[in-house]
Every structure is written in structure tokens, then in C-alpha cells.
Amino acid sequence: MPKIMIIGCGRLGQIIGNFFQTNKFSVFGIRRSKVDSSKFPMYSYDIFSNEFDVFFHEQKPDYIIYSATPSSQDPKDYELIYFNGLKKVKHLSSQLPKSKLFFISSTRVFNGHHNDTFLDDDAKTKPSDPQGEVLTNAERLITDAEDGMVFRLSGIYGLDRQMMIGLAKDPQSWPENRYTNRIFDTDAAHIIYQVICALYENKTISYPRIINVTDSQPIDLYTVLSFIRSKLKLQPIEGLVHDHVQGKKIISSYLMKKMNYKFKYPNYQSGYLKIISTLYD
């Protein structure tokens, strides 16, 4: 039975783990803090500690999903968790010849793009801040190695992630309009699960080293917020400008064409209808 170790096993990590748990994989999570309830074993370790090193070598995971996140937006915290932590786990993984390492990154690495070009899986990164630079360097730790993959997530949302619902209700706090990109958390988890399962089953599939995990339906922010307001039966906002919107448009030709992934929530309408129906029906 293959072993899956999820490092930084928060909300997304637990959804990923649940897919593996129900399909005869041995899965366990690693967190800094304890978790009261989980469908699979969860361990509290500081990944920089010697105790974690001992635990890692005792468990000998076949697949490591690095999903750790910093506790703040401070670039130093980003460097510590996204780069130094990943570098250490990469070193540990290299001592297990058959293990594979997967890094959950972010499309923040594209934040310097401000034109109408669609950014596919192989688009060049263009970070616009120190945090994006750290993520870009962390991705290189994976892509410069012989094995491993990067799952680069766009804006993640779901039943427990309702920031846009609150923003839609408060038009006075709306920022300048821009293009937005998203992925429902259960779709993101299922994509990661399916890719790793295919690798385990030795399916003759050629995977890219980086996959943009996104629904490939970029849309401007005001259109999304206006849609949410309409479904909440709130008064429409007059005079919204939808022209000359800037921002990044992210797609994944791999998910759409080669993997032919069937999204449960393929666009913002289906995703937010699900959230709203769950909250208010």
C-alpha cells in the first residue's frame, strides 16, 4: 500500500488526504499544530526538527505533498516555509530513491503580467513582489531536480472559503477591477489525487513538470461580484466599468485538453451557486 505524506496538512491537505484515504492508500498529515479530528492520522511536527527527520525516515513515504504555508505575508516567513522548508524536505526525499515530491505553489508567480495574454502551464513566471520571488525560487527547487512536480493553484475557493461572498455584500470595499482566476478546493484536491494515482499505476501519461491548477475560465472581478449579488438578491451596482481590465488570465491546456479533466465546478457560476445554495437554502 503506497504511503502519502502531506506536509502542511490544512484545509486543502485534508481534502486531498480524504480522496486517498477512501481509495486504499496509506495517508497521514503533518502540521505544526494538533488537529482534534481527521479522517486519517495527523501528526504534529516542526519540519525543521530532528524529530521530524527521524519520523520521516521511519515512515519512508512514497509520495510527499508539500502544502505548507507561512503564518504571515512577511517575505521572511515565505522564505522560511516555502523555500527553506521545501529544500529540507527535498533533501530528505532524495534519500528515498523511489519517493516523489510534489509542491503546491501559487499563481502569484505570474503577478507581474498585466496584459491580455493567456498564461498556460509553461508560461514564464513574472513575480511582482518578494513573496512571488520566493515561490518562483521554490518551484525551481522542484523543476531543477530529476523528479517531482509543481501544482500551481489559482485563487482557491470553496464551501469554507467565503471571502468573495462577504466582499460582494460590501461594495464600498471593492478594489479596482481586475481579472481573476479560481479553482474550487474539491476540484483542486481531486486533480492532485488523480495525477498521483496515475503515476502510481504507471499509466503511460506524459505529465508536465508544472500544472496550473485552475478552471481556465478567467473573468473580471466585478462580473463575479455582480453575479454573487444577483444570486443573493441584492441591489445591482450601477456604473461598474468592465472595459480595459488588467490582470493575469490563467489557463491550463494540460487539464483541458490532454488530461481532459471533468471539473465539478468548471466556472465561477457553478462554484458560487453551490456555495450560496449551501449557505442560504
Image (cartoon, rainbow, N blue to C red):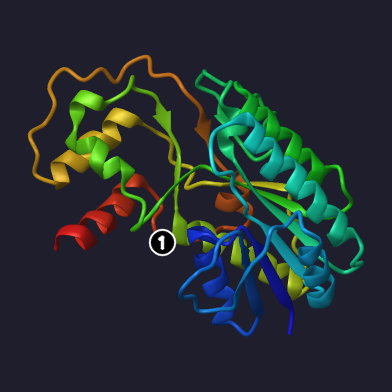
Q: Position of residue 200 (x, y in %)?
A: 75, 73
Q: Quadrant of residue 169?
A: top left
User: 10 Å neighbourhood of mark 1: few (<14), some, or many (≥20)?
Assistant: few
The vertical placement of 206 against 28, above or below, is above
In the depicted view, which residue is nearer to us: 171 or 32? 32
| Residue 50 visible in the shown view | yes
Q: Left of 93 or right of it: where is 228?
A: left
Q: Quadrant of the N terminus?
A: bottom right
Q: Position of residue 187 (x, y in %)?
A: 48, 59
Q: Quadrant of residue 73?
A: top right
Q: Which residue is mark 1?
A: 264
Q: Which amino acid type corresponds to the residue marked 1 in the rendered image? A: Lys
Count of marks placed on residues: 1
| Residue 209 visible in the shown view | no
In the depicted view, which residue is nearer to us: 163 or 252? 163
Q: Left of 188 or right of it: where is 201?
A: right
Q: Position of residue 198 (x, y in %)?
A: 70, 69
Rendered residue at 47%/47% (across/down): 215
Rendered residue at 52%/18% (across/down): 115
The vertical placement of 223 against 197, above or below, is above
Rendered residue at 20%/59% (across/down): 279
